[in-house]
Amino acid sequence: MTREAQIVTEFLKESDWSVMFRWISKENLGECDYKKKRISINMELELVDTLVHELLHQRFPNLTETQVKKRTLKYLRRMTVAEIKKLAKRIGG
């Protein structure tokens, strides 16, 4: 295990915070709530973001990584929350 993985594992063991997988918003992949001592991860958005990103690589192999990232963001901004959730469900989220 890398040092970084060990550090994160220790943080989780020692922490009295909870970790949740839940919808946050279209703009946030994660959230740290100090009052509730909770880290939330937006798995639906993360899944669709990754799917769109990799599909863009497949469809446009000559785009640079920066171009793919910009286009991914553009796609996600244009999609509705309902569309994102539907796609996440379709791919297993």
Image (spheres, grey):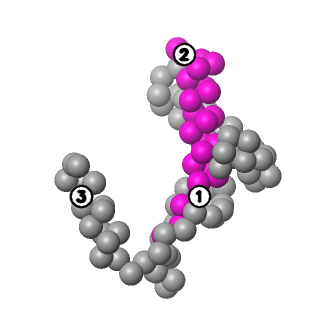
In the picture of the structure, the residue carrying the numbered disc 2 is 61
Mark before the other along the chain sequence, 1 or 2: 1
Whole-Å distance between the Cαs marked 3 and 2?
A: 36 Å
Whole-Å distance between the Cαs marked 1 and 2?
A: 28 Å
Type of amino acid at the residue the image marks with label 3: Gln
In the picture of the structure, the residue carrying the numbered disc 1 is 42
Q: Residue at x 47, y 75 (%)?
A: 18
- The answer to whether one can see residue 89 in this image is yes
Mark before the other along the chain sequence, 3 or 1: 3
In the picture of the structure, the residue carrying the numbered disc 3 is 6
Residue 46, how many percent across, how many down?
57, 48
Q: Residue at x 54, y 16 (%)?
A: 61
Residue density around tag 3, few if under 14, some if 14–19, many if 20 or more, within 10 Å:
few
Q: Magenta residues?
A: 39-62
Q: Residue at x 35, y 77 (%)?
A: 15
Residue 39, how many percent across, how many down?
48, 70
Magenta-drawn stretch contains 47: yes
Give 92 or 8, whichever is nearer the viewer.
92
Magenta segment's dominant SS is helix
Disc 3 secondary structure class: helix
In the rendered view, tell whether residue 24 sits above or below residue 17. Answer: above
Residue density around tag 2, few if under 14, some if 14–19, many if 20 or more, within 10 Å:
few
Rendering quarter of residue 14? bottom left
Count of numbered marks: 3
Residue 92, how many percent across, how many down?
66, 45
- The answer to whether one can see residue 28 in this image is no
Whole-Å distance between the Cαs marked 3 and 1?
A: 24 Å
Disc 2 secondary structure class: loop
Task: Name the mark nearer the viewer: 3 or 2.
Answer: 3
